[in-house]
Image (cartoon, rainbow, N blue to C red):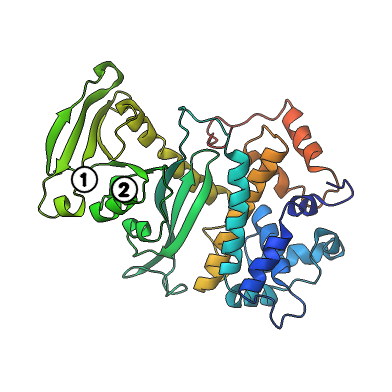
Amino acid sequence: MNAGRPVFSQLMSLLPLPWFRKCVQRYRGDHYVKHFSCLDQFLVMAFAQLTFRESLRDIESCLRAVSRKLYHMGIRTAVSRSTLADANESRDWRIFADFAQVLIGQARQLYRHEAFDWELEQTVYALDSTTIDLCLQLFPWAHFRRRKGAIKLHTLLDLRGNIPAFIHITHGKVAEVNVLDVLVPEPGSFYVMDRGYVDFLRLYALHQGLAYFVIRSRDRLQFRRLYSHLIDKNVGLRSDQTIVLTGPLSSKLYPERLRRVRYFDPTTQKRFTFLTNHFAVSALLIAQLYKCRWQVELFFKWIKQHLRIKAFYGTSENAVKTQVWIAVSVYVLVAILKKQLHCELSLSAMLQILSVTQFEKVPILEVLNEFHDDPKIVTSSNQLSLFNF
């Protein structure tokens, strides 16, 4: 990275631009565009994410104040809020969704050897969704309740590196379990889910796709025990059984055997019952894998605190999805930077530094090291530790 370039330009130099151009060409994003290209749109929106801009007017005012520096940041044209609003409304959001998947693929390659709490060769995913409330009058397409709008972010989180491997955006009325219809199972991988995803037809589709699932069982499950296996009650286990479903419908939807593990958590004093189609790993590991599902909850909390996905710059479905996917791209790009620089700072600390150093012509590594070496800076004990690798 050239020390004579602004920090923003150094960060954006990590973007695989040939892939970005392919995504633009795929959806004819720059067709008949003369000035404000899709790349300019991405850079401006990325800048807004990194510097926590509040509105289109805020973006315009900030960039006009540094108009002489825009060329060195890679933005080749003046930015107005009307032009940016039109671009967000009209240019296909799939351009940025496809490009985010390219960045996600790069990040997962970098984090594939990340240390995991248990020695598992298989990939472990946590699947969950979060709801972002919207004003129904401004976002009439985002159906949720009678007088309330919302969108849902259905996310599949790779627990090695906490990188989102899959994101599906829907309006608020779509049930969580429906995302299993668009999810392509990865053979040999574990999918950890809460009981909101209990649908035996869809779980059997995962099983037939040679994938494993760990899911919390619902109450009053109708089943018949075939075998009971030895357990160590000193570690919290209460039972480890091989079962078949006996419900009039569930037995037809999932005709194969299942494994039922009961666990008592001494910390929360709660009892849990899990179902899985994996019979080889230990019963304790099944309970521990489910406990890892909390990482996706922390991921949702983190992105809502540190990225602009709760207040939107446009009201159309296209504008909202464009903003969300560019926010995801920025998150993954900073994760790539962290890995490539072998930085020990958390992603939240890195984003805070980048937010105030975008125009500095100093190597990014030097900026991050100066922050890290300052003994006066103390990390709050309340700060999420999800990304402290």
**Residue 202 at x, y percent in the picture:** 29, 55
Q: Residue at x 80, y 62 (%)?
A: 74
Q: Quadrant of residue 122?
A: top left
Q: Residue furthest top?
A: 234
Q: Residue at x 59, y 39 (%)?
A: 111
Mark 2 sits on what residue?
Answer: 207
Taking 49 as reference, is 255 left or right?
left
Q: Residue at x 77, y 77 (%)?
A: 35
In this view, 58 is above or below 87: above
For badge 2, the amino acid type reads His
Nearer to me, 368 or 189: 189
Q: Is residue 331 visible?
A: no
**Residue 321 at x, y percent in the picture:** 53, 66
For badge 1, the amino acid type reads Glu
Taking 225 as reference, is 314 left or right?
right
Q: Where residue 256 is drawn, which disc sits there? A: 1
Who comes first in sequence, dot 2 or dot 1?
Answer: 2
Q: Dividing the image into 4 quarters, which one contains the C terminus?
A: top right
* Contact check, label 2 and label 1, Cβ < 8 Å: yes
**Residue 309 at x, y percent in the picture:** 54, 58
- Crowding at dot 1, Cα within 10 Å, few <14 / some 14-19 / many 20+, comes out as few
In this view, 140 is above or below 106: below
Q: Is residue 63 visible?
A: yes
Give the CA separation, mark 2 to mark 1.
Answer: 9 Å
